[in-house]
Image: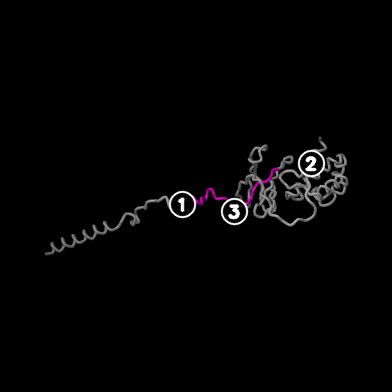
Amino acid sequence: MKQMHCALFLGLCMAVTLHAAETISPDDDGAIPRSVNMEDFDALVTNSPFTRSLGVSDSLILTGVAHFETDTFATLLDTKTFESHVVSKTPNFQGWQLVGVGGNSAEIQTWSAKIQIPGGEVISVRYQKPPPKPPRAKSGGSGGSGTSGGNAPPLTSSQLNEAKAAAVNYKEGFSSDGYPKAPPPEMVAKLSRLSTSQRETINQQMLGLRNQGLGLDERRKIYEGLVDRSLQR
């Protein structure tokens, strides 16, 4: 009798085991990996972490590159705020630093700049034609057509007049030469050796650079370089 009971018990256990094996699918077995569907990669394809642009560079475009002696300056434009930024090998007030420029100097569409932002991350900004500024109320006279250099807007009539007046009264200095007050005596001596037209051309270039957002120290360095090169010619 005991043998019969044991045989019946073993048969019942085997039946339960076989039924469980039939009802549990491989997908539900935690020991067996589930198959991967292409739908699982939809999020990565549409929002890849490798092609996603950094927030700081979403609205930045490169609008100009200027070389002065051993220094290189790049002007950036925030297309959302239309605020202009200047970067060089010296970090600006935002901590942005120019670490390199690329492209063919003769083909502006190929220009690019690599900018290191706080934290050590490097972003790449490419040249784009600046979009038109939103309309604003007119004030003062109409714009002129002075030599501003780069992609800065043309000089206004008042700026052209300022450049001409400062070329005559060069000892007093003007708003864009980079000096907080009148130029030092050694710079006045150099300016005296230039013609009025040469000083006026330099003044127009400096006003154009100020329009691009260059700070006081950067303008002074560029101004001195322009004067020295004009004397060498």
Instruction: Return the mark for residue 226.
Output: 2
* Residue 166, image x, y percentages: 85, 47
Q: Earlier in the sequence, mark 3 or mark 2?
A: 3
Q: Residue type at mark 1: give it.
A: Asp
Along the horizontal axis of the image, is 85 left or right of 171? left
Work out whether residue 68 or residue 36 is closer to the camera in this orientation and state it: 36
Work out whether residue 5 or residue 57 is closer to the camera in this orientation and state it: 57
Along the horizontal axis of the image, is 6 left or right of 130? left
Along the horizontal axis of the image, is 154 left or right of 123? right
Q: Secondary structure at mark 1?
A: helix
Q: Is residue 57 magenta?
A: yes
Q: Which residues are magenta?
A: 45-65
Please tell me how many numbered marks the rendered image carries.
3
Query: Residue at 67% across / 55% down in the picture?
Result: 81
Q: Quadrant of the N terminus?
A: bottom left
Q: CA distance from mark 3 to mark 2?
A: 37 Å
Q: How is the structure coloured here?
A: one colour
Instruction: Return the mark for residue 42.
Output: 1
Q: CA distance from mark 2 to mark 1?
A: 56 Å
Work out whether residue 190 or residue 204 is closer to the camera in this orientation and state it: 204
Which residue bears the numbered disc 3?
A: 55
Determine crowd level at label 1: few under 14, some 14-19, many 20+ residues with C-alpha closer than 10 A.
Answer: few
